Amino acid sequence: MSGELASVEPDGPLYRVAREPDPWAWPDWSYAGPDGTFGNRYDDPQASYRVLYASSQRVGAFVETLARFRPDLEVIA
């Protein structure tokens, strides 16, 4: 892996559910748990980068905020 990031432009608006004053700010590391992650499914297990969640649809942005409340399918089985 080269370490370079590709930049892409969305076809339309992006939606994000977040807090003021800056909804596009990276979450502060002080909010990370003891494992260095923020408790989200795409967090870096090595805690070296942070993730911002956004969607091209409003409902997608809202549903992503509920992801942590999904039941674990292995527990249900």
Image (spheres, helix red, strand yellow):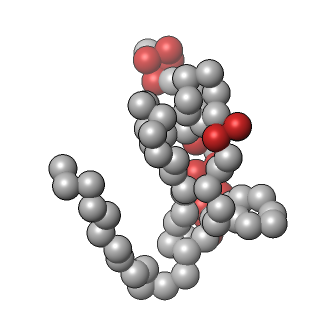
Residue pictured at 51% horizontal, 51% vertical = 51
Residue 72 in picture, x, y percent from top left: 51, 24
Question: Residue 34, image x and y in percent?
Answer: 62, 21
Residue drawn at x 47%, y 45% as measured from the top left: 49
Compared to residue 45, the image places residue 77 above or below, namely above
Q: Quadrant of the C terminus?
A: top left
Q: Position of residue 18 (x, y in %)?
A: 71, 59
The answer, for residue 57, to whether it is visible in the render is yes
| Residue 69 visible in this rendered orientation of the protein | no
Measured along the vertical axis of the image, is residue 36 above or below residue 6? above
Res 2 quadrant in image: bottom left
Front-lying residue, 57 or 23? 23
52 relative position to 45: left or right = right
Q: In the rendered view, tell whether residue 16 sits above or below residue 12.
A: above
Compare residues 37 and 12 and report the one nearer the observer.
Answer: 37
Q: Nearer the viewer, residue 15 or 71?
A: 15
Q: Residue at x 58, y 41 (%)?
A: 67
Compared across the picture, whether 10 is left or right of 22 comes to left
Please provide percent x and percent y for residue 63.
61, 53
Specify the quadrant of the image occupied by residue 52: bottom right
At horizontal 64% and vertical 41% (from top left) the residue drawn is 29
- Identity of the residue furthest to the right in this view: 21
Image quadrant assignment for residue 5: bottom left
